[in-house]
Amino acid sequence: MEWVPGGGPYDRLMPSRARSRRWLRAAGIALLLLIVLTLLGFLVWARTGVMAAEPRPLQGVRSDPGIAFTEDDDAVALRPATTVAASTGLVFYPGAKVEPEAYAARLSGLVTQEGMTVVIVKPWLNLALFDRRELSTFTNLAPGVGTWIVGGHSMGGVRACQIADEENRGLLLLASYCASNLSDTTVTALSINGRNDGLSTPEKVMRARGNLPEDAEVVEVSGANHASFGDYGAQPGDGTASVPDDEMTGLVAREVSHAFAGIL
């Protein structure tokens, strides 16, 4: 009798195994494509709809004779336009998808009134929580500054909380709150929020109050909303502001001066 190849039970299993391998290969390729498309979609989302700095307030800072305005790929820096170097500085993280320059005017009072250097981070993907660069990336832009405060607006404040410690002697939160627990630290903390904030609402701020040191100062500004802490226009979901921009700029400078009197 002549033996016919492929007639045994083992050989009958071969097509099934080949189909399984093809299915697994196709599933792997589909999963890889899904991951790639998701990442591309996220990158497109992160880079579109960025809230731009309003030109007029920014131009006012650029033309202010009391402020030296510089920027590079990492940050925007505001320094006192004097021969005396600032001894205290602020590294500030913007809110999600807000141009860093949108905070220049609101933080300008810290430079002109308090003699501070302010470094506003340009976060990766316009999202502060994704920026894992060392703080020294930004403090090295002002090597003459000896004492640093870290701070931020909205998501930027959450990032500031992650890197705040006793080495960075102050923490400034604008319309933000800590997701990480700093209650056992000796960091000097100041939280300023708006009563009309529709995003970082007063209720959210107070619920997270326990994550700050016991002696932290919390200031609620009547008539201020989420966007009151920058100059980038209205923000979806926010409340209505009634506080003028120049008043907010002066208020931030005054509250910082009071809360960080032992540092400045």
Image: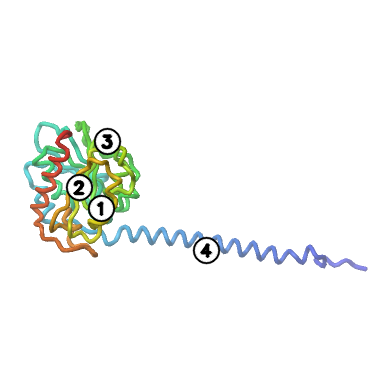
Residue under numbered circle 1: 205
Q: CA distance from mark 3 to mark 4?
A: 51 Å
Q: Give the residue at x 20% y 47%.
A: 218
x then y, percent, for residue 259: 16, 40
Question: Which of these two is toward me, 153 or 85?
Answer: 153
Instruction: Tell me, for residue 218, which label it has, or none.
Output: 2
Residue under numbered circle 3: 186
Q: CA distance from mark 1 to mark 4?
A: 43 Å
x then y, percent, for residue 32: 50, 59
Residue 196: which quarter of the image? bottom left
Residue 67: which quarter of the image? top left
Q: Relative to 44, say whether 141 is above or below.
A: above
Mark 1 Cα within 10 Å, few/some/many (few <14, many 20+)? many
Do the residues bearing badges 3 and 2 touch, measured as CB atoms within 8 Å? Answer: no
Quarter of the image where the C terminus is located: top left
Residue under numbered circle 4: 30
Mark 3 Cα within 10 Å, few/some/many (few <14, many 20+)? some
Instruction: Report helix, strand or loop for mark 2.
Output: strand
First along the sequence among labels 3 and 1: 3
Do the residues bearing badges 1 and 2 touch, measured as CB atoms within 8 Å? Answer: yes
Give left or right: position of 25 versus 120.
right
Q: Nearer the viewer, mark 3 or mark 4?
A: 3
First along the sequence among labels 1 and 4: 4
Q: Give the residue at x 14% y 61%.
A: 241
Instruction: Report helix, strand or loop for mark 3.
Output: loop
First along the sequence among labels 1 and 2: 1
Q: Nearer the viewer, mark 1 or mark 4?
A: 1
First along the sequence among labels 3 and 2: 3
Amino acid residing under circle 3:
Thr
Amino acid residing under circle 1:
Val
